[in-house]
Protein backbone atom coordinates (compact mmCIF):
# COMPACT_ATOMS: atom_id res chain seq x y z
CA UNK A 1 0.00 0.00 0.00
CA UNK A 2 1.47 3.31 -1.08
CA UNK A 3 0.35 5.23 2.00
CA UNK A 4 1.90 2.64 4.33
CA UNK A 5 5.19 2.82 2.40
CA UNK A 6 4.99 6.57 2.61
CA UNK A 7 4.56 6.35 6.36
CA UNK A 8 7.25 3.72 6.94
CA UNK A 9 9.85 4.61 4.35
CA UNK A 10 9.29 8.29 3.66
CA UNK A 11 8.10 7.78 0.09
CA UNK A 12 6.09 10.61 -1.37
CA UNK A 13 2.34 10.37 -1.91
CA UNK A 14 0.77 12.75 -4.43
CA UNK A 15 -2.80 13.87 -5.01
CA UNK A 16 -4.15 15.99 -7.84
CA UNK A 17 -7.42 17.83 -7.36
CA UNK A 18 -9.14 18.65 -10.66
CA UNK A 19 -12.11 21.00 -10.75
CA UNK A 20 -13.62 24.32 -11.73
CA UNK A 21 -13.43 27.39 -9.45
CA UNK A 22 -17.17 28.00 -8.98
CA UNK A 23 -17.71 24.54 -7.48
CA UNK A 24 -17.95 24.65 -3.66
CA UNK A 25 -16.82 21.02 -3.36
CA UNK A 26 -13.72 21.83 -5.40
CA UNK A 27 -12.98 24.68 -2.97
CA UNK A 28 -13.48 22.30 -0.01
CA UNK A 29 -11.18 19.73 -1.62
CA UNK A 30 -8.48 22.39 -2.04
CA UNK A 31 -8.76 23.32 1.66
CA UNK A 32 -8.61 19.65 2.62
CA UNK A 33 -5.57 19.17 0.39
CA UNK A 34 -3.85 22.14 2.03
CA UNK A 35 -4.53 20.72 5.50
CA UNK A 36 -3.23 17.28 4.50
CA UNK A 37 -0.10 18.72 2.90
CA UNK A 38 0.68 20.93 5.91
CA UNK A 39 0.33 18.04 8.34
CA UNK A 40 2.26 15.42 6.34
CA UNK A 41 5.69 16.18 4.94
CA UNK A 42 5.57 13.27 2.45
CA UNK A 43 2.31 14.29 0.82
CA UNK A 44 2.16 16.66 -2.14
CA UNK A 45 -1.16 18.07 -3.35
CA UNK A 46 -1.48 19.70 -6.76
CA UNK A 47 -4.50 21.67 -7.95
CA UNK A 48 -5.61 21.66 -11.58
CA UNK A 49 -8.23 24.27 -12.44
CA UNK A 50 -10.46 23.53 -15.44
CA UNK A 51 -13.01 25.84 -17.12
CA UNK A 52 -16.55 24.79 -16.22
CA UNK A 53 -17.51 24.73 -19.91
CA UNK A 54 -14.74 22.17 -20.56
CA UNK A 55 -15.41 20.00 -17.49
CA UNK A 56 -17.33 17.10 -19.08
CA UNK A 57 -14.84 16.80 -21.93
CA UNK A 58 -11.96 16.99 -19.44
CA UNK A 59 -13.48 14.19 -17.33
CA UNK A 60 -13.87 11.92 -20.34
CA UNK A 61 -10.22 12.39 -21.29
CA UNK A 62 -8.76 12.31 -17.78
CA UNK A 63 -10.67 9.23 -16.61
CA UNK A 64 -9.17 6.98 -19.30
CA UNK A 65 -7.12 4.26 -17.64
CA UNK A 66 -8.36 5.04 -14.12
CA UNK A 67 -10.95 2.25 -13.90
CA UNK A 68 -14.72 1.87 -13.95
CA UNK A 69 -15.45 4.24 -11.05
CA UNK A 70 -13.57 7.04 -12.81
CA UNK A 71 -15.35 6.33 -16.08
CA UNK A 72 -18.72 7.03 -14.45
CA UNK A 73 -17.59 9.99 -12.33
CA UNK A 74 -19.48 13.10 -13.48
CA UNK A 75 -19.16 15.57 -10.61
CA UNK A 76 -16.65 18.17 -9.53
CA UNK A 77 -14.02 17.75 -8.19
CA UNK A 78 -12.14 14.69 -9.34
CA UNK A 79 -9.25 13.59 -7.13
CA UNK A 80 -6.47 11.32 -8.39
CA UNK A 81 -3.63 9.77 -6.37
CA UNK A 82 -0.20 9.08 -7.83
CA UNK A 83 3.09 10.86 -8.38
CA UNK A 84 3.66 9.55 -11.91
CA UNK A 85 1.36 8.88 -14.85
CA UNK A 86 1.73 5.10 -14.53
CA UNK A 87 0.93 5.12 -10.79
CA UNK A 88 -2.26 7.19 -10.97
CA UNK A 89 -5.35 5.85 -9.19
CA UNK A 90 -8.82 7.34 -9.02
CA UNK A 91 -9.84 8.50 -5.53
CA UNK A 92 -13.21 10.09 -6.31
CA UNK A 93 -14.86 13.36 -5.44
CA UNK A 94 -14.61 15.51 -2.33
CA UNK A 95 -16.33 13.08 0.06
CA UNK A 96 -14.19 10.17 -1.18
CA UNK A 97 -11.06 12.28 -0.68
CA UNK A 98 -12.20 13.22 2.84
CA UNK A 99 -13.02 9.59 3.74
CA UNK A 100 -9.65 8.33 2.44
CA UNK A 101 -7.86 11.09 4.34
CA UNK A 102 -9.58 10.10 7.58
CA UNK A 103 -9.04 6.38 6.98
CA UNK A 104 -5.32 6.92 6.38
CA UNK A 105 -4.97 9.32 9.32
CA UNK A 106 -3.79 12.17 7.10
CA UNK A 107 -5.77 14.70 9.11
CA UNK A 108 -4.02 15.78 12.27
CA UNK A 109 -6.20 16.62 15.25
CA UNK A 110 -5.72 19.96 16.99
CA UNK A 111 -6.80 18.50 20.34
Image (cartoon, rainbow, N blue to C red):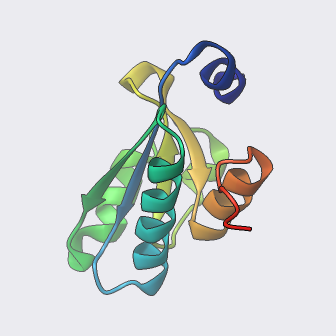
Residue at 65%, 51% in the rendered image: 69
Using the rendered view, name the quadrant where residue 54 is placed: bottom left
Q: Position of residue 25 (x, y in %)?
A: 49, 79
Which of the image's four quarters has the N terminus?
top right
- Using residue 26 as the reference point, say whether residue 4 is left or right of it: right
Q: Quadrant of the C terminus?
A: bottom right
3 or 81: nearer the viewer: 3
As drawn, is 46 to the left or to the right of 6? left
Residue sitting at 48 percent across and 31 percent down? 42
The picture places residue 5, in percent across and down from the top left corner, at 66, 18
Q: Nearer the viewer, residue 111 or 19?
A: 111
- In the image, 90 versus 9, the foreground residue is 9
Quadrant of res 21? bottom left
Q: Is residue 87 above or below residue 46?
A: above
Q: Residue shown at 31%/87% (left/top)? A: 22
Q: Which residue occupies the extreme top position in the image?
A: 9
Picture mark count: 0
Residue 106: image location, x then y, percent: 65, 48
Q: Is residue 98 above or below residue 61?
A: below
Is residue 38 positioned above or below 29 on the image? above
Residue at 40%, 56% (x, y): give it. 17
Residue pushed farthest right? 103
Question: Residue 46: percent from the left, percent from the top?
Answer: 33, 48
Amino acid sequence: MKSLNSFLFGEETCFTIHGYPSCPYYQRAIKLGDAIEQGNKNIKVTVNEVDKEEWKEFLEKESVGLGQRAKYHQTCPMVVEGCTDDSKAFVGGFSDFLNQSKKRNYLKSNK
